[in-house]
Image: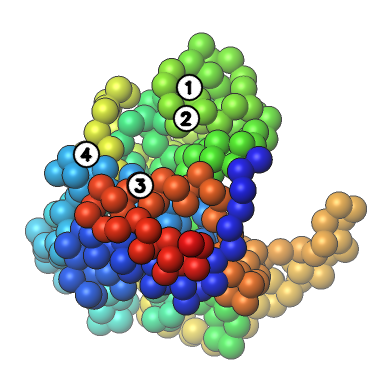
């Protein structure tokens, strides 16, 4: 087991700002990237948190990630937008794309946003939360252009990415319902976290380089590579393919077809549907019916082995509250990787360590 650090939130923000400045990012981008990554850690999704910075550094140094890029509009059809992320930080590109889509959905009642060529969009739930904060329902289909890491149902090697799906529903007076998941059994980043911690992954999540079941996370992190499996067998595989067809072929004009890519960049395409419920029906009636159903579902007697009936988004909010108060846990291996990445970016690792309170 790897040594664990717990870093106070203000110190972690300051330390990660130092690292992100190494990309040459402007102040607004530094805040957006550092804040988004730390928010992923706060919500309990360490796979999409600050541990991504070493990968980002590699992508930047190979010329595949463009700091200070902004969204470029390729097609403006009013309630239909086609956008190019220009290989910019997804933490910036995703926010800009959603802001444009929100504006149009407010004006037209709905908007379809086709975003391509964005560097890693991070935790997709952040974009559903942004839409929900504006009072909009949203759906997001995302593909991943990187080294293939997930096997199709019945396949013995990797053919596509973790291809996340996300949906968000806002409710007046209550937190939104945010459903956000990789179509693989676990996210690729969770295997990296498990390997860094010296842990095994759950059974039935991975196959090795010969297509045999394994619990060793190394098979998605270092060669020889195996593959993640999709959740729910053919169901998860089918949804992953839809994410590739909609987020990739349709939105981005680019699908995953290179299983042996050596590049470190992670590009995403995202097909998003944004809807103002009040344009479709009486909003209060919709919300009343939705909340009545959620209360009905929550009233189910709790089964043995569970603490409560949970609604999508609740585990993330509980983790955010706990880690905000107690600090963010980071394993020693991941922290050393971040310090090494800082050095590659021309940032003093010792200063980052001191800022985080770990010297």
Residue at 81 percent across and 70 percent down: it is: 299
Measure how far apart labels 4 and 2 are at the Cα level.
23 Å
Q: Tag 3 or tag 4, which sits nearer the N-term?
A: 4
Residue 197 seen in the figure: yes
Q: Compare marks 4 and 2 and give the one earlier in the sequence.
A: 2
Label 4, label 1: how far apart the Cα atoms are: 24 Å
Image coordinates for residue 220, horizontal then vertical, percent:
47, 30
- Of residue 130 and residue 68, the one placed in the foreground of this image is 68
Residue at numbered disc 1? 226
- Pointer 4 residue: 254
Of residues 98 and 30, which is closer to you in this image?
30
Return the x and y of residue 267 as percentages of the image width and height. 27, 45
Q: Which residue is mark 3?
A: 340
Q: State the separation of the CA atoms marked 3 and 1.
A: 27 Å
Whether tag 3 and tag 1 are in contact, CB under 8 A, the answer is: no
Give the secondary structure at mark 2.
helix
Residue 14, located in which quarter of the rendered image? bottom left
Labels 3 and 1: the sequence-earlier one:
1
Mark 1 and mark 2 in contact? Answer it, CB < 8 Å.
Answer: yes
Q: Residue at x 55, y 22 (%)?
A: 207
Q: Which badge, 1 or 2, comes first in the chain's sequence?
A: 2
Q: Quick one: label 4 or label 1, which is nearer the N terminus?
A: 1
Q: Earlier in the sequence, mark 2 or mark 3?
A: 2
Labels 4, 1: front one: 1
In the image shown, does 45 or 347 lie closer to the viewer? 347
User: Which residue is found at the position 54% from the left and 40% from the top?
Assistant: 196
Q: Secondary structure at mark 3?
A: helix
- The circle drawn on residue 220 is 2
Number of callouts in the render? 4
- Mark 1 secondary-structure assignment: loop
Image vertical order of residue 320 relative to residue 262, above or below: below
């Amino acid at each position: 087991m790897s040594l664990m650090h717990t870093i106070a939130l203000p110190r972690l923000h300051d330390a990660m700002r130092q690292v992100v400045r190494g990309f040459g990012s402007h102040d607004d981008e530094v805040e957006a990237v550092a804040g988004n990554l730390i928010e992923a850690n706060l919500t309990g999704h360490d796979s999409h948190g600050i541990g991504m910075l070493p990968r980002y550094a590699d992508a930047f140094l190979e010329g595949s990630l463009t700091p200070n890029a902004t969204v470029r509009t390729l097609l403006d059809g009013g309630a239909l937008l086609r956008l190019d992320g220009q290989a910019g930080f997804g933490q910036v590109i995703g926010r800009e794309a959603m802001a444009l889509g929100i504006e149009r959905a407010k004006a037209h009642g709905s908007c379809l946003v086709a975003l391509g060529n964005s560097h890693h969009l991070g935790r997709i739930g952040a974009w559903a939360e942004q839409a929900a904060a504006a009072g909009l329902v949203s759906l997001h289909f995302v593909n991943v252009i990187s080294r293939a890491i997930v096997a199709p149902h019945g396949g013995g090697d990797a053919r596509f990415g973790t291809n996340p799906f996300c949906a968000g529903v806002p409710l007046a007076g209550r937190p939104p319902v945010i459903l956000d998941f990789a179509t693989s059994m676990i996210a690729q980043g969770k295997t990296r976290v498990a390997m860094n911690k010296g842990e095994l992954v759950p059974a039935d999540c991975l196959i090795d380089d010969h297509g045999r079941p394994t619990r060793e996370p190394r098979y998605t992190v270092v060669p020889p590579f195996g593959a993640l499996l999709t959740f729910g067998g053919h169901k998860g595989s089918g949804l992953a393919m839809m994410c590739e067809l909609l987020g990739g072929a349709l939105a981005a004009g680019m699908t995953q077809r290179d299983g042996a890519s050596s590049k470190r960049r992670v590009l995403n395409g995202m097909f998003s549907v944004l809807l103002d419920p009040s344009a479709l029906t009486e909003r209060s009636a919709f919300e009343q019916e939705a909340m009545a159903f959620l209360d009905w579902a929550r009233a189910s007697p709790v089964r043995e082995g569970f603490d409560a009936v949970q609604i999508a988004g609740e585990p993330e909010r509980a983790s955010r509250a706990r880690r905000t108060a107690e600090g963010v846990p980071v394993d020693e291996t991941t922290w050393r990787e971040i310090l090494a990445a800082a050095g590659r970016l021309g940032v003093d690792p010792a200063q980052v360590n001191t800022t985080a309170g770990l010297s």
